[in-house]
Image (tube, grey):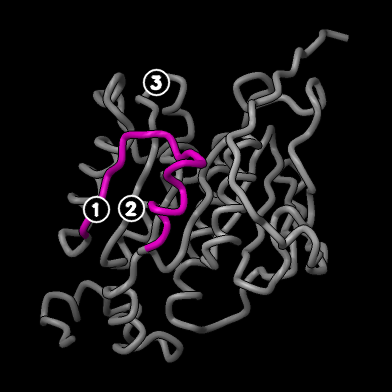
Amino acid sequence: MTLSEEQIERYSRHIILQDVGGEGQEKILNSKVLIIGTGGLGAPAALYLAAAGVGNLGIIDSDVVDLSNLQRQVIHFTPDVGKPKVESAKEKIAEINPDVNVTAIHDLFRADNALDIIKDYDFIIDGTDNFPAKFLINDACVMGEKPFSHGGILRFDGQTMTYVPGSASYRCVFNGPPPPNSVPTCSQAGVFGAIAGMLGTIQAAEALKYIIGKGDLLTNRLLIFDALKMNFRTVNVKPNQERLKITKLVDAEQASCELKNG
């Protein structure tokens, strides 16, 4: 493709980068990225991928905007309360960059639709907030041989890793969802709003690096950070061949956690 004068100006800060250039920007414009969940992680990821010029953005979420979301889900505004999140996100993406084609799916990502949804995308971003969804995304991407970025946040902490076919997957770190009453959700334990932006933008950067084929991805490494102490560390992860053998997809139940005041 040939970049228009308007596109050359819009993406000029990418184009002058030696590791991106016009060729890299054209790859971005021709790419297809799916964001599963348009909440704390999916919101900043969608904003930066749209700004970068990802040609086709898929967004899937079954939820509607709630007032409590606005503390961290920066793609949604106060007038959007009650609106499906994918509609709210699609409107903002269109305002940021008309180059981006958005496929909005107001539905759950489930075992019976997962493989069909991911099949046409180059890269997947996990922006969900519960363990059953995270393991389903992992398993679908392993089965479908699709690269994806895992992300998770709670309180002041965040973690992320990137999977490409053959590398360690989320299951190589955590074999299965935690048992009941072991890990609270963000709605139970709280989450520091800014860390959603910190992690979501890292996930967007991983997607863009994969698309242009530059840099070192977070493969076989789990990046963990504590924003309260502003401490970052990485843990090396080895591929577990048994855990990479995914033969079927399942919809697991979210285990509840009863927080007790000590």
Q: CA distance from mark 2 to mark 3?
A: 22 Å
Helix, strand, or loop for circle 3?
Answer: loop
Disc 3 target residue? 66
Disc 2 target residue? 58
- Identify the residue at horizontal 42%, vertical 68% (top origin): 122
Question: Would residue 143 be found to the left or right of residue 88 on screen?
Answer: right
Asked whether 38 falls inside the magenta stretch, the response is no
Looking at the rendering, the stretch of residues picked out in magenta corresponds to 101-119
| Residue 194 horizontal/vertical position (percent) | 55, 41
Of 64 and 256, the residue lying toward us: 256
Of marks 3 and 1, which one's residue comes earlier in the chain?
3
Residue at the far front: name it.
247
Q: Amino acid at mark 3?
A: Asp
Please tell me how crowded label 2 is: few (under 14), some (14-19), or many (20+) other residues with Cα within 10 Å: many
Q: Is residue 36 above or below residue 240?
A: above
Q: Amino acid at mark 2?
A: Gly
Q: For residue 47, which numbered disc appears in the image?
A: none
Question: Would residue 251 be found to the left or right of residue 88 on screen?
Answer: right
Asked whether 111 falls inside the magenta stretch, the response is yes
| Residue 82 horizontal/vertical position (percent) | 30, 19
Q: Are marks 3 and 1 in contact (CB under 8 Å)?
A: no
Q: Are marks 1 and 2 in contact (CB under 8 Å)?
A: yes
Please tell me how crowded label 1 is: few (under 14), some (14-19), or many (20+) other residues with Cα within 10 Å: many
- Identify the residue at horizontal 62%, vertical 65% (top origin): 163
Of marks 2 and 3, which one's residue comes earlier in the chain?
2
| Residue 7 horizontal/vertical position (percent) | 17, 76
Q: For residue 102, which numbered disc appears in the image?
A: 1
Question: Would residue 235 be found to the left or right of residue 209 on screen?
Answer: right
